Amino acid sequence: MNGHGSPPPLPLPGGVGVSRLCVYDTAAPDGEIGGTPHLHLCCAEAYVVVAGDGLVQTLTLAGYRETPLRPGAVVWFGPGTIHRLVNQGNLQIVVLMQNSGLPEAGDAVLTLPPEHLTDPATYAAATALPGGGAPGTDLTAAHARRDLAVRGFERLRAAAKNGDLAPLRDFHSAAVSLVRPFVDSWRERWLSGALRAATETGRQLDDLARGEAPYLADAAVGQFAEPHERGRHGMCGLLDTYPVT
């Protein structure tokens, strides 16, 4: 059995990451209450709504969409989906992330105005938080970062609604350029995480096809007795996080 802060003896299923999110309850420049619009380059994401009400705004080359979020709902989307959580009352979500560790390693890119997306240093200066967003630090910077991303998101959304996808395509290109320096380190995380989990399933199937199952002797139980950290300043709200494995 594992206590606070101790990783389990085996990774979460499929190499996913998990956190609990209380969505920000302050208003952005457009009057909507909630989080920071962004996309992921390599990670699918899923929401399991556990309390409150709200919606997720999404923008892809297929268009703009709003999906309601109510307790019991499960909503998910793939890489490249710009998403923004809107809090209509105490919205709380369990978040499942593909490729545990990649979001923390820079897989997310915020929809900042173009002048902040020119190079990694400029982007980092616009998105950095005091103390890295550690619990207990002031939320002013997190809200300011959110507001800046909302202004960029409004521009992309307005253009897409008018049938002009060029700004969205330009944002995609800028996002790729920003994360390209990190791809080699991401690959290492993928090799030891999600790919390893899938490869182990293949080996188990091979064993079963031979009428064997030696891996059953290694069965184990993992547990996080409580979050590793409570109230970290995330892009969409306050996060209760668990150790990245």
Image: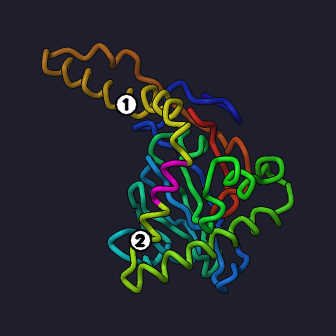
- From this view, report whether residue 185 is shown above or below residue 107: above
Q: Quadrant of residue 87?
A: bottom right
Identify the residue at horizontal 86%, vertical 60% (top origin): 138
Q: Is residue 219 left or right of residue 158?
A: left
Residue 214 vs residue 182, the one in the foreground: 182
Region rendered in magenta:
172-177
7 or 108, nearer to the observer: 108
Q: Is residue 108 left or right of residue 115?
A: left
Q: Position of residue 210 (x, y in %)?
A: 13, 15
Displayed quadrant of residue 207: top left
Q: x and y percent of residue 16 in the render? A: 47, 42
x, y percent for residue 111? 57, 65
Would you say the magenta stretch is mainly helix, strand or loop? helix
Secondary element at tag 2: helix
Residue at 62% from the left image edge and 74% from the top image edge = 150
Look at the image and say whether residue 48 sits in the magenta stretch. Answer: no
**Which amino acid, mark 1?**
Leu
Disc 1 versus disc 2: nearer the observer: 2
**Which label number is shown at residue 195?**
1
Report the quarter where the N terminus lies. top right
Coordinates of residue 224 in the picture (x, y in percent)? 61, 38
Q: Residue at x 66, y 30 (%)?
A: 6
Can residue 127 be seen in this snapshot?
yes
State how far apart marks 1 and 2 are (Cα): 34 Å
Point out which mark residue 166 bears.
2
